[in-house]
Structures are given as structure tokens and as C-alpha cells.
Image (cartoon, coloured by chain):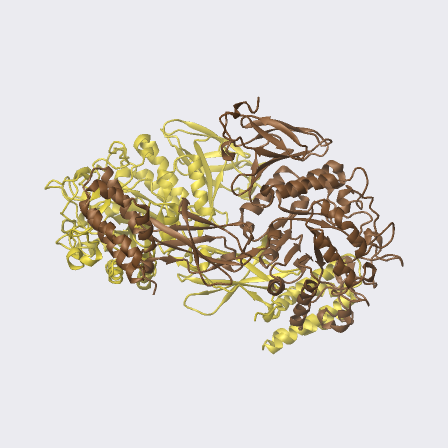
Chain colours: A yellow, B brown
Amino acid sequence: MVDGRQRVIIENLSPQVEGGKFPAKRTLGELLTVSADIFVDGHDILSAVVQYRLDNSSDYLEAAMSHQVNDRWTAAIRVREPRDIFFTVAAWVNHFATWRVQVKKKVAAGQDITVELMDGANLIRTTAKRAAAQGQAEDAAILEPFAAHLTEVPVTKAIAIIDDPLLAELMNKHAARELRSRFPEELRVRVEPRLAAFSSWYELFPRSTGSAGQHGTFQDVIQQLPRISNMGFDILYLPPIHPIGETFRKGRNNTPNAQPDDIGSPWAIGSADGGHTSIHPELGTMADFNQLVTAADKAGLAIALDIAFQCSPDHPWVATHPQWFQMRADGSIQYAENPPKKYQDIYPFDFECEDWQNLWIALRDVFLFWIEQGVKIFRVDNPHTKPFGFWFWCLEEVRKVCPDALFLSEAFSRPKVMYRLAKAGFTQSYTYFTWRNSKQELTRYVTELVRTAPRNFFLPNFWPNTPDILPEYLQYGGRPAFIVRLVLAATLSSNYGIYGPAFELCEDAAIEGSEEYLHSEKFEIRTWDLGRADNLQSFIKRINTIRKAHPALQQTWNIEFLQAENDFVLFFAKFDDDMQDILLVAVNLDPHHRQSAWLNLPLKEFGLDEKQPYMVHDLLGDDKFIWQGHRNLMELDPQILPARIFHLKKRLKRETDFDYFM
Amino acid sequence: MVDGRQRVIIENLSPQVEGGKFPAKRTLGELLTVSADIFVDGHDILSAVVQYRLDNSSDYLEAAMSHQVNDRWTAAIRVREPRDIFFTVAAWVNHFATWRVQVKKKVAAGQDITVELMDGANLIRTTAKRAAAQGQAEDAAILEPFAAHLTEVPVTKAIAIIDDPLLAELMNKHAARELRSRFPEELRVRVEPRLAAFSSWYELFPRSTGSAGQHGTFQDVIQQLPRISNMGFDILYLPPIHPIGETFRKGRNNTPNAQPDDIGSPWAIGSADGGHTSIHPELGTMADFNQLVTAADKAGLAIALDIAFQCSPDHPWVATHPQWFQMRADGSIQYAENPPKKYQDIYPFDFECEDWQNLWIALRDVFLFWIEQGVKIFRVDNPHTKPFGFWFWCLEEVRKVCPDALFLSEAFSRPKVMYRLAKAGFTQSYTYFTWRNSKQELTRYVTELVRTAPRNFFLPNFWPNTPDILPEYLQYGGRPAFIVRLVLAATLSSNYGIYGPAFELCEDAAIEGSEEYLHSEKFEIRTWDLGRADNLQSFIKRINTIRKAHPALQQTWNIEFLQAENDFVLFFAKFDDDMQDILLVAVNLDPHHRQSAWLNLPLKEFGLDEKQPYMVHDLLGDDKFIWQGHRNLMELDPQILPARIFHLKKRLKRETDFDYFM
């Protein structure tokens, strides 16, 4: 039976995902702020600590919590090691502090405190005995004289004694342990690698990297590495690199019947040349791939592979493991379909098959194979069409071998489905950002991601385009639309990516009435004129340079939307944990017209003096502005520069700087 | 190991209190709506059921759930027995429904479905075999012919067969059980008595019921029963009825030194005449009390006692169980204090004493004693100054003996403290209503109570006044203020109460600068002229009559705040589960001035035709109004009637009623 004298209540621990069923996520270097509702009956004063340990240790560390507001207590812990953290909270009545407050109130009211001082001395003596009994004789030796002094000295001196910080510390340290309340469950925080929090992705089809019209190879990709690295990206992501099926191969623009020279979709995986652990012969050999991984690493780029768990009818597994597919009454295998559409080039796995356990193992082994080839980053295709339980198991299994593996979930599905995949273990997730264009849409969506439950398990990755999605905004907004969406993706989210060549060149030709690229690289080789004068390379490089220089852009959570008095202008602040690096981002969401807006800044929050001018330095245009007061007018011309990223220069406190702005 | 083919995810079950640590609460007769997020990978069609049982049974009942929006599924269960309910949710892929949707899409697209029909026949045969294997041969016998027909008949007939509801029902009934997902925990719903949801409390000091100046007795209270019952109350609540201490007794108006004729506070419990299980001799004997309980019962009133766990220095326990109190260094017992204030007439219990277990038992036994005297309703004084763990244990113990005991928590404390007491087992709770006066305050507070987490465990009880609180609004608002607060308490909340005589007579004299009544009955006998011409008795009776006649007012949860275009006018709708009983309440919150407002009614929501006039019948003034359209103007004069409770008359659909409103 619990000791009924453990009076303190601890509730509503955070971060917590579904009552501890899944770990919360934090990244290396991040602050882990633990919060809880903590209170007691009556009016006693409390003490509370977070007790935490790393997953390879049973030694607990403690971090003192402090009361914020409305019985909410917090402590912030810096995540310094790449190990999961287990934590809980303990709290207890601080009888000494309670006593001290009462005594001081009585002194203030001019009441006699003789008996109170005797009570206090008794409390100290009891505590000293407890310390001694627990082998802390030195602490007991320090405490004893306090007790003696309290009842011997004149009252005025006693009051000085009771405020001694050492006394307070030791009294709390040796408070009766058996009366401590401890939250009964230990909660887990998964510590993800730094790259999980801050990454810039570049997607490229190797097939289009060859010299004009030739099928590109890994060797051709190697040639591109300096250019991509120079733009400031961290991750080079390749669509599936496996042999492509021939049966029911799709032609250009996703037409049903391929011509003999059509090269097919890389997502129709598997042919006589192999399956998920083989390389498409036209791209090169495994040795070439290994060379690419090494060269990329030297260039500061990590290779990310696309894992798409589905088979072309020519995949070796169709013959060797037919039981993994759904057999129809006529003996054929069920292909993917969404009537009336048929995807006869794709066989989905049947996760309800009797042999599901071997299927799970085979799929896990695909990851393990590529990890052996030096790959740690995986973009997973359509994970929402495979069981959540499979992912939970599989990603844990892979992490056992490679703890800093990173999985990006490509689920453009319903909100709860996307969130569940993140809980099940995906590191990062594609989002609805791709279709959130207006100020209200962007504000609402980002607020949902950073202020509600998903904040603890869903690391968003913002993509303005993908090979599957050329959104309307880009189709009709011209070059300014690409700039706007790039700035939004790269500043609203610390993780972002672009489908590269098409984005650099502001490619906006879609199949009529759809979001599909016309002449999509999914089905044919594209020849990109990357040297074109109007390319976005230098702008992209500037964005990535700003991101790397400013901690404010290296996490997604520290954002505050600010008022801009124009519905086409989005205005927000990004800042680091210490508010030392503050950026103000203003974006004209209208790619067609000049918009101006009064931008409202809560000066005090950002440590600015209301009566002094201050300087903001636009890092995009390298322009400097002197602002004063809460409201400043800004014009954003899509044809010149539709967005600004202002670095807020705080004034140094110097006697002589009064003429700094003269 | 869980079967990896259980693909369906069930999350976020509701109602749920702290992950099932505490039961949710519903009352007898109420609808229990169970909700969950339910989804699966891919695009299969799901079925889901609530599985529930009563606490005295292990037989599960099932209620089919239906999809609402955004993967949220619900089922509503009527609570018909006074027994706690345990529930969970099961869900599975409905393969037959999934197949049927695919087939119909293909038919619509003109595609051949020969193989699909064969697949379907196989599915039916497998299911029939499963039914037979599970001893449901009749179901198998019904299913088999469907399979045969499906592949024999022409396609057009097959389509008719697959829509047969019996086929759908049996196919789902015999879907593979081993692939069902089941939410792993069973959640509990505490089923409270009907009175927990709908009650009208009247508080009265027996001391003031005697003939002029005499100390009242239980026999005097018996004389008052018809009057109180006639006003429509259910519960007659008495402040503590125990012997009153003499040491440090408080005098009139809470002065420190009582005069010899001062009768003391009933909350200073215990004297030579006994403690918490004794009766103050001036009130009568235990036999008198028993007579009161019986007489009240006959008059349709339940007696509620005040349980205040504290002792006067003269309480027998101070001598017999000194270990239950905190001893000071000078040998005195610690009295209650909040420096500089001293409450020397009150000794709090020391819940951290070594003998805490016997203390808990003794306090529990106080409840049990009064239950033996026929009392089931307890208003508990200051529960927030006793450990939450004690209450959790004690109230469970008492419920074992008296399952329909009702506990009202008198904690006017911080929000989380009040909510925790409700989780710990208190049936109803006092609220901040007493100090919520403006439209914004009332709207925000009621919305918090009925739309956020507390809805599942916190049953509010709204009191416009108590012997401890004469709020400013009543001090300065005159008779209209009392009417306004009464209407608000009795319509916003299905549980409400008044500190009776003082309320009936609009007593508004307070001690200067405080919320304390001047000449409070807590310290002296008051002579109330209940027959005064301006008393509120008939108005109170009308309010209670309306409450009893209208299911809309018999639960707190079904409320919708509506727009009134004046910040002094609060306008809201109350309705029953079937929207058959709809009331519209309009209240002028300004007790000094006439206010008029355009009242906005969402007609469609309430089943009204936008083009037709409709009648609203004000049940307070017995006035009828013909309204038309969304906006109607209403004037509310505090001197005449500051509030209206409109009953919305729905038009009957008759051919000949077109001239009804002519």
C-alpha cells in the first residue's frame, strides 16, 4: 500500500505521447523541457525534481523544477548525448520552507515567534538525525549548530539564520524520502540525430544527369556533387535506384503502353536484374554506388535512398515468394488499383498473408542491406499503405543496427494517419505545406504542428515541390512563386527539401488539370539546362547560407507569428533558445502584385527599447533599415524581392552609442 | 507476440480521464457517447464496435460505431442501470464491404467483373466455413447459396445479391476474429445517481428556524419542509449539526472574543457533548434528527449534511487521539492559522501523523455513521485541505456501503486542485460561477466546463451565494441581481443551490469591504421575515417548475451560446438529446439598466424554416412572441423581468396550419 502521507499530486507530465505508449522526440543539442502539474492539499510549499537517466544507465540525475503558473512546474535539460532519455518527476512538501514563510509572516505582523523558533529547531534536529542515519554525517554536522543557534540567539539574529541558503539546501536535501511522491511511470524521449532537426534535402533523378539525352549514371551524379554541395544542401535524395520492371511498363507522361525506348518508372521495382537490393544496370554497379556514397560524404552530402515496398510483376520475389502477394480466383496476382484506375505494373504486398512474418523480415533486411552500403537516410514511399505495426517493429529493428538512421515518411494522407506514422517511428514527415498558401492556412497549420500534440513526435519537412506534385501556386506564379515558397519552406521549417533541377529552373509546365509535371522524369529522361541565366542557384545558396549561420532557423519550434496589416503579407519571428539570434521574416504571398504592410513587432518581448530606433538587416537583399516603434511599413515587390529575412540587431548598452543611428 | 495482421489502429478513446487512472462519470439515464480515432493503412473499409459490460458482469455487449469525420468513430449507449460500465473498442477490416465497393466502382466504369465475382464467392465460402467451424451452422447455411449465386447468375443479378443487407451482416459478423484489433485497456465509467446530474439545493441554518430569537431545532426545521418542498427543491442542506466548541469560540461577525450568549460557529466542531457523530443539544436529539430525515423524505427532500473534518479544542478526539494533531514545541496543539490571522477555535488534523491509518478510518466512519442515520448526501467542507489520496480511498470505501452516496466538494481553490478532487471521487463540485458575472466570463467558464477535459469528471453545481460568500454583484445589484443570478445558476447548470433565506429575501448587507454577510448566521441567530412581500419565493418556484418540466435543463452539457448583439445580454440555447425540447435563455446581466439586443438564432440547427414565422413562449413571464428569421430584437428591463426563458415551439407539419400565426 502506498504511504498515505505522500500528499503531493503529480499529473499531466510532458512531453508524453499517448500516455507513454510511444516515445516523445527530441534531437541532439535541443532543450528538453519537462513539465508537470504539481500541487498538494492545503498551502504547503513544494519542491520538485525531474529524475532522468540515459538508456544505457540506471543512474538517475536530478534537475530542480520551478513553478511557472497555475500549478505548472518545469525544468529544462539540455540533450547532450545521442542516447534516449527516460524521465519521471518526484515532488514533496518542503516543510522547512513552509515553516520559514510562516515565521516571516509572523515577524512582519509583529507576532511573537518564540515557539516557532523552537519548532524550527526541532525540525532541523530531526533532519540532521535523518542525514546522519543515511551516512551524511557532514551534513548533520552542519545542520546541528543551526538548530542550537535558532533558540539561543536574539530573534533578530534568528531571522538571519533561517534565510541561510545552505540551511535551506540541506533541509530540502534531507527531507523525508518516504513522503516523496513519484510519478509512477517512466516516460521515454527518443533522442534523434542533429540532422533530424536541421536538414536541407535535394532530390535528383540520376537518369537525367547524363550528357544530352544519355541515361545518367552514378558517375554522372558524382560530377554534380560539388554544385549541389555548393548550394548548401546536406542530403542528396535519389528516387529508387533498383532494376525497373518491363511488364505493363508505363510510357511517357504515365501513358499505359510504353514504347520500346521508354525507360519506365523507378517505382516499378524489380526485373530479371534483381529487386530491392540490386541496382538498375543503366545507373552503374554496386561499386559505382559505393563510390557515389563516398564522394558525397567528402562533399558534405549524405545520400538518401527511396524505399518503396512494392514490386513490378518482374520482381524476383513474385516467383520466389508468391505467397506474399494476393492471389485472385483466376490464378493471377492482384495488382494495385483504384477503380477505374489500374496500376498493372505494381503488385502491392499482402500484409495479411499467412507468411507475414517472413515478409516483415525480408523488408527489414532491405534497410539493413543499404545500411551496409553506407546509407543511413531513407525516404519511405507511401508508408501509409503498409501496416503501422510493421513500421513500429521494422524501424526499431533497423535502429538497433544503426541508431542514427533517419526515416522520412512520404505519407500525404489524412492527419491522424500521418501522425500515427510519426509515432510509430518515422523521424521526419512530409506535410500539407505543399498546399498551404494563404496567410491563414500557413499560420493555422504551422501553429498546429508546433503548438499542439504533434510537436512532441512529428518533425515536419517542408517541400514546395516533389516529382509527384507541382502545386498550382507554382504552376501559375512564375519565378516569384518559387522564391516565395522556397523562403517559406526554409524558414518556417528547419527541415526542408526541393525536387532540385525542376525547382532551380522554375519548371512550371504541368499536365493540364493536374499537379503532375508534364514530361515527368518519373517516366523519361529530362535534359535540364542548369546554367540558364534565370536559375535560382545563387538564391538557394543564399537561403542555405543564412540557415547555417542562424540558430534561429535550426529548429522549427521557436516561431511566433506577428501581425502584418495586409492579408497577403506573412510576418513571423524565429529565434534561438536564448533570444540571442532573432530573425524577422516577411513574405509577400501574392506572386503577382506589390504589397506593402505595416509590420507589428512586440518590442519588449524582443528586448528592444520602445523609445530607441533599432536596425534590421535584410539578409536576402543585404539591405539595412532603421525602424522605430512597434509599427513599420514595408513594401515587398515580387519582381524584385518578394521576401525579406531581417536580422534584428540589438543595441549594445554603451554610454556613447546614442549617436549610432544619427 | 501480437498478430502482425491486426492492422487497424484504435487511439484516443473517450471518455477517458488521465489514461484511465480515474473513471469518467455519467449519470443514470444519460447517453454515454464512446469515441475513438480508428483507421487502417491503405483504403480498406472498417467496422468498429464498443464492447462494454456492467461492473457485476463479465458478459460483453456490443454497440456498432459509425464514422463521423476525420477518422473519428462514435457509438452512443444509454445508461440504464446504476452500475459502473467498463468499455473498450474493437475494430477490423471489413473485407466484404471493401470488396463490394471495389466491384461497384468497376461496374460503374463498365469494367468486367467476372474475376471479382469469383473472388467474392471465395470470400463468402471462406466466411461460411468459419461460421460453421464456430458452431454457427445456420449462418453458414445462409451464406453458402450466396456464394453459389454470385458466380452463376447474370452479372446484373449478382449486383443485386451483393447489396443484400443480410449478406453484409453475416459477412461482417463472421469476419476473422484473430485479425480484430482491440484497444488494450478497459476504461471505466462511474455511473452516478440521477440526482448527481439534476438537483436543486437549499441551504438553511437550523439555528434560525425557531420562533423569534429562540434557537431553532430540528422540529422547527420540520415545520419549514412544506415551504421548501413547495418551492421545488430536492435537497435540504444543513451546516454542521454537531456540538460546538467553547474554547476560543468566535463571537458575532467573527469577532475574536465571544460573549457568554454567543452561540459560536457550527464549523468549530466538538465539545463535551461529543464530536462528528453527535448532535448539538440545542438542535435536538438523534431521534429528532431521524424524524427530520423521515419527514424530509416524505416531503420529497433529501437531507444533506456538512462534513467538516476539523476539531474545536474541546472535541473528544483532542483528548483521546492527540496523535492526530500537530504538537508544538511548547506542548500546545497547532491551531489553524494564516499569519497574521489565527483560528484558535480550529485544530486541523495532521495527515502526516504516524497514526494516519487510524485517522483515515475514523473519518470514513463519520460518513458511515450518518449513512446509517439515513443520510446519503454530503457537502464536504474544504476538501482541498485534506490529502487527495485520503479522499480517493475514503469515498470509495463509503460507496462500497452506499453506492448512490453523493458528495459535493466545497473547494473554492485553484483549478487543478478542484479538478483533482472531482477525479478523486467527489460527485459534484462548487465552482467559480459565484464570481463569473460578465458575458465573456460566463461564456468562457461554462465552455471550459462542458467542452474540455472536466466534462468527463467534474459535475458543476452553481451557487449564486453561500453563507461564506455574498458576492459584490449581489451586494450592489438589488433584487434584479438576485433574479439574474438565480436564472443563470438554474439554467446554465443542471445542479444549482442557494443559501436559502438570505437569498429569498435578497439580503445584501455585507461587512464593509468583504464578501462576508453582516450578522452572519455562522455566528448568530437571524430572524428572517420569510413572508415579506418582496420575497423571491414564487419566482424561485417558477424556476424550479420550469426545470422539472424541461429535460433541456436537466443536464449541463447540452448548451450552445448564441450571439446577442449587446455585451450585457447573454443568450444561449439548452436542449435535450433529441432536440425535442429546446429552450432559449436571454439574460440582461446589467441589473441597473434596460438593455435590448438582437438575438441571433441558427434556425436550421434548431429545425426551423427560414421563411416561416415561429413562436417562442417565455416561461418566466408567460409571454408569447412571434419571431421570424435569424435576428429578433428583445428588450430586457431589470425592474420588470431581467431574463426570459423561451420555449421554442416547433411548427407541426400540417396542411392547414398556414394561418396559425395570422
The quarter of the displayed image where residue A29 is located: bottom left
Farthest residue toward the right?
A: B260
Q: Is residue A148 left or right of residue A473?
A: right
Query: Is B123 drawn above or below residue A654 in the view shown?
Result: below
Question: Hey, which quadrant is residue B155 in on the image?
Answer: top left
Name the image quarter holding residue B88.
bottom left
Q: Is residue A622 left or right of residue B631?
A: left
The quarter of the rendered structure image containing the N terminus of chain B is bottom left
The extreme top residue here reads: B662
Which quarter of the figure is the C terminus of chain B placed in? Answer: top right
Q: Say whether residue A73 is visible.
A: no
The residue lying at 59 percent from left, 75 percent from top is A136
- Give me the residue at 59% from left, 45% from top: B556
Q: In this orientation, which residue lies closer to the viewer: A404 or B81?
A: B81
Percent of width and height locating residue B198: 62, 48
**Residue B281 appears anywhere in the view:** yes
